[in-house]
Amino acid sequence: MWGVIKMVKNKMLYDIIIIGGGPAGIISAVTARKYYPKRKILLIKNIEKGVIPCGIPYMFTTLKKPEDNKLGNTPLKENNIKLRIDEVIEINKQKRKVITKNKDEFKYKKLILAMGSQPIVLPIEGINKKGVYTIYKEMNYLKKLKNKIKKSKNIVIVGGGFIGVEFADELSKLKNVNVSIIELLPKVLFNSFDKEFSELATQELIKKEVKIYTNLKIEKINGKEKVVSVSLSDGKTISADMVILGIGAKPNISLAKNAGLKISKGGISVNKYLRTSDKNIFAVGDCSEKTDFFTREKISVMLASTATTEARIAGCNLFEKFARKNMGTIASYSTKIKDLTLGSTGMTEKTAVERGFKIIVGNAESFDKHPKNMPNTSKIKVKLIFSRPGIILGGQVAGGESAGEVINIISTAIQKKFSLSELEDLQIATHPKLTSAPTNYPIINAAQNALQKLK
Ligand SMILES: Cc1cc2nc3c(=O)[nH]c(=O)nc-3n(C[C@H](O)[C@H](O)[C@H](O)COP(=O)(O)OP(=O)(O)OC[C@H]3O[C@@H](n4cnc5c(N)ncnc54)[C@H](O)[C@@H]3O)c2cc1C
């Protein structure tokens, strides 16, 4: 009898439990396996059929079928990580156990919270009408959304951040569909880019016949049961048979809050090792608060790239005495609208000035192959922002597909706090078919442009 009870209890005891099966949860589990090969690891997630979140906008036309954007369980299987499809409804931090909806209990030595975020729903009149959608990261929901999109003629996207812009780019490929974006700020992508880069995005969307309404709020969704139009803050009404909300997300914190963990405005509070207020519990990804790399202020950033960086740090730190520090986020991000690739990392000129930095800006434009008559050559534009003594704070890139990796060179330079002259002396590989010319490399030229202004 005792033997049986003990056996059942042992079965439910894990060294490491991870709650959440998004990018942060999966990478936490896989990293924990690398650092702790002999530990028993369990991942609990409440969505059986997940999707790759960053691929969601492309499930509607670019990918052949929604299932092509499935988030599979292969990394868990390959790394001997047990998986439960269930929802954790309680964390008992004194007894170090989690309780699930199916009434199972699992004890842990270390727990990682990777519960992610939920889309924000605007509290406006008509929000519950048929035809109004938010973006949930769930396969069946998105398959239904795809079917509804096919039957729509006038789609209004609320929010001109990266989700709204990527949806607009994708949906404007559909025949006989009018797509509009409503944005509260003066330009689309205005939180991550300075105005000249936002303007490039605007022009690209206009070429695709997307209508853009900026400096405007959506005030009301009209229609009897189903949406027929939306009213804007300037009194305009736009026809709509579908409204997609892409106005941001809020962290999933209720489980942590009910467990008595410290919560801040941006999510579950964590220290530089990504530990919560309980030493055996870590939090990563969209559900946890974010610290700015430069100022150490708490900021709101929800990116899969940030989530997975944190997951790699927490996954390593679980049982480590000399733990790795999270240096804070620089919010590196890239996107593509039609043929235009845009990348942003660190501070924009606008945010640097707002935060009181004295700055120098360097700009450069060249081509991403050489000579410029090489096939598939695109123009590339780089902007670098430096603090007054000349340390890099941020960068933005616009161009063809190569811009997607050029921004990552700038991200690396920011993390290593490169100076103007270190960027000028950058050692790079160049090739006519692959890169800009060594004599005309845009990052180096932008650094030289800033250096001249400093002198
Ligand atoms: C349309 C769209 C496009 C995006 N594009 C990009 C991009 O190009 N680049 C980029 O960097 N970022 C992008 N993002 C942001 C990115 O998706 C998020 O930052 C990322 O998903 C965060 O990962 P996460 O694991 O922290 O959270 P999530 O992906 O939200 O995953 C959390 C998981 O935990 C589960 N869960 C929550 N509570 C429980 C519980 N109690 N029990 C069990 N399971 C639970 C949830 O159901 C969910 O599956 C995009 C987001 C969207 C919506």
Image (tube, rainbow, N blue to C red):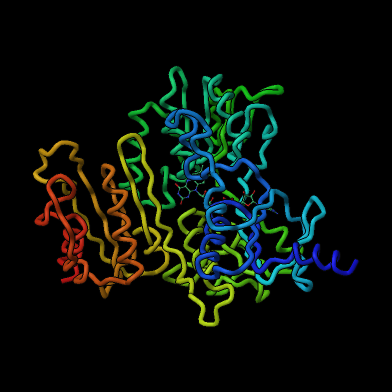
From the image, which quarter does the C terminus lie in?
bottom left
Q: Relative to 145, is 101 above or below? A: below
In the figure, is residue 340 to the left or right of 64? left
Q: Relative to 62, is 190 above or below? A: below
* Residue 315 falls in image quadrant: bottom right
- Which residue lies at the image location 55% right of the left edge and 70% below the top edge? 36
Q: Relative to 418, is 128 above or below? A: above
Q: How many marks?
A: 0
In x, y percent, where is residue 98?
A: 75, 62
- Which residue lies at the image location 20% right of the left edge and 41% below the top edge? 378
* Residue 146 falls in image quadrant: top right
Q: Residue furthest right?
A: 1
From the image, which quarter does the N terminus lie in?
bottom right
In x, y percent, where is residue 65?
A: 50, 29
Q: Residue furthest top?
A: 176
Q: Relative to 5, is 168 above or below? A: above
- Which residue lies at the image location 58% right of the left edge and 30% below the top edge? 143
Q: Nearer the viewer, residue 296 or 253?
A: 253
- Which residue lies at the image location 56% right of the left edge and 36% below the top edge? 233
